[in-house]
Image (spheres, grey):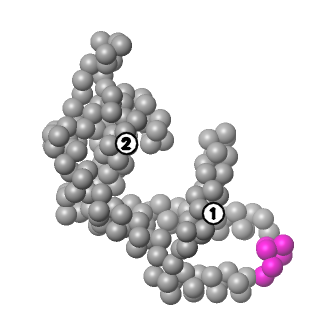
Amino acid sequence: MLHQIVSTYEMVKKLPEYSDIPINELDNRIFFRLYQCANMMHKTGTRAVEAEGITTQQWAVLGALSHPDADAGMSVGELAEFLMVSRQNLSGVVARLEALGHLRKTKDASDGRARRIRLTEKGEALWQRLTPMIHDYYTDALGGFSFDDRVDLLYRLNGLLGNLKSL
């Protein structure tokens, strides 16, 4: 893994000065790399948790609902907004997890017509089994990145996310 990072760094170092690269070409490289990373995260993330028979989309839903702030559950709209996906894309994932017994829908205490999605005990147990697998995956995926590198990456990704949200 470190070899891949070093070779990528060496490749980037060999590029002409950034001021000599047309900004559109640089932008294209950045967004294409993000596209490749997203695809690889889906592919390798699924492999990381395949022993539990879940997908990366299910992992994201379970992770969101396992957060202490989600103790009261989340509406489909809140969950979709948090995960930045459409309600349509989310509904199938939620239905599958509910059919597997990992989620349940309950009436909202403040609005009896609305439903809140919560982890079941089975879902909480699954999340506990997944957590070490996920941490190992993160460690491997971020191999060669120092703490400061990780902070810088998160800072820059947050900036990009903010820009994308404003479009």
- Which range of residues does the magenta coloring cover? 16-21
- Residue 160 lies left or right of residue 36; in this view the side is right
- Quarter of the rendering occupied by the N terminus: bottom left
Q: Residue at x 33, y 28 (%)?
A: 72
The numbered mark at residue 152 is 1
Q: Classify mark 2: residues with Cα within 10 Å, few (<14), some (14-19) or many (20+).
A: few
Q: Is 20 a magenta residue? A: yes
Rendered view: 105 above or below 10: above
Instruction: Describe the element under mark 1 as helix, strand or loop.
Output: helix
Residue on which the image places disc 2: 67
Q: Residue at x 72, y 68 (%)?
A: 25
Q: Is 90 a magenta residue? A: no
As drawn, the residue found furthest toward the right would be 19
- Residue 75 lies left or right of residue 4; in this view the side is left
Of 21 and 72, nearer the camera is 72
Instruction: Describe the element under mark 2 as helix, strand or loop.
Output: loop
Rendered view: 95 above or below 110: below
